[in-house]
Image (cartoon, rainbow, N blue to C red):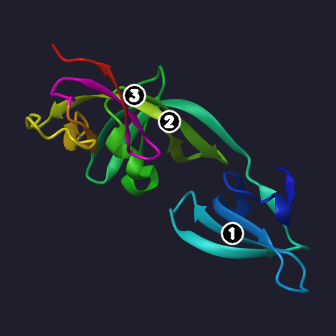
Amino acid sequence: MAQLNYNEILQGRVIVIDDEPYEVLDAHVFRKQQRKPVNATKLRNLKSGRVIERTFQAADNALEADLSKKAVQFIYAQKGDAWFHNEGDPKSRFALAESVVGDGLKYLKGGTVVDALVFEDEVIGIKLPIKVELAVTEAAPAVRGNTAQNATKVVTLETGATVTVPLFINQGDVLRVNTETGAYVERVEKAG
């Protein structure tokens, strides 16, 4: 684990505070008038999901968390848990609370391979691919004459997630969706 100075604690880094891994969601290094510079951060606990704010002074250091990744396959979600197994080993099943998996769960379908984040031999979360391909299961038909200004509609995907898309998207189309923003990217395959 590397030692980070106060100004190296930047967005996207994972640091250890009180033996818990925290992801830096936001960091802003600034100086108030004649005072020494500080780094005001917003941190998310990777185990509990709790978000805290913490200010690091110029004399402060933090340990960078030693995270590793391993490929796991999503099986299903049931009763507040998301079930996975190590890729290629269906007998090595384990569950993560839906709160740990977060919003990414709505983009996972059975058989999807994702990266599990491992901290001190414990799986603490998953890292989804930035874009996934999902089929449209429900789409209202386009209304004729409603195309004057970037007309859109909401469709339901095979995982139950809803996405706002252009009017030309139909049931059965396969779409590419950004898992970070939840936005439609493009149509990959046309139905029929």
- CA gap, disc 2 to disc 1? 24 Å
The secondary structure that dominates the magenta segment is loop
Taking the spot 23% from the left edge, 23% from the top edge, the residue there is 173
Give the mark, 2 or 3, whose residue is nearer the N terminus.
Answer: 3
Q: Is residue 92 among the parts visible in the rendering?
A: no
Q: Is residue 148 among the parts visible in the rendering?
A: yes
* Callout 1: SS: strand
Q: Amino acid at mark 1?
A: Thr
Residue beneath disc 2:
130
In this view, 11 is above or below 188: below
**Which of these two is toward me, 164 or 105?**
164
**Which of these two is toward me, 75 or 189?**
189
Residue beneath disc 3:
112
* Callout 2: SS: loop
Residue range highlighted in magenta: 168-184
Q: Please tell me in which quadrant of the rendered image residue 9 appears.
A: bottom right
Q: Amino acid at mark 2?
A: Ile
In this view, 96 is above or below 58: above
- CA gap, disc 1 to disc 3? 33 Å
Is residue 173 found inside the magenta-colored segment of the image? yes
Q: Please tell me in which quadrant of the rendered image residue 95 appears.
A: top left
Give the mark, 2 or 1, whose residue is nearer the N terminus.
Answer: 1
Residue beneath disc 1:
41
Residue 105 lies left or right of residue 17; in this view the side is: left
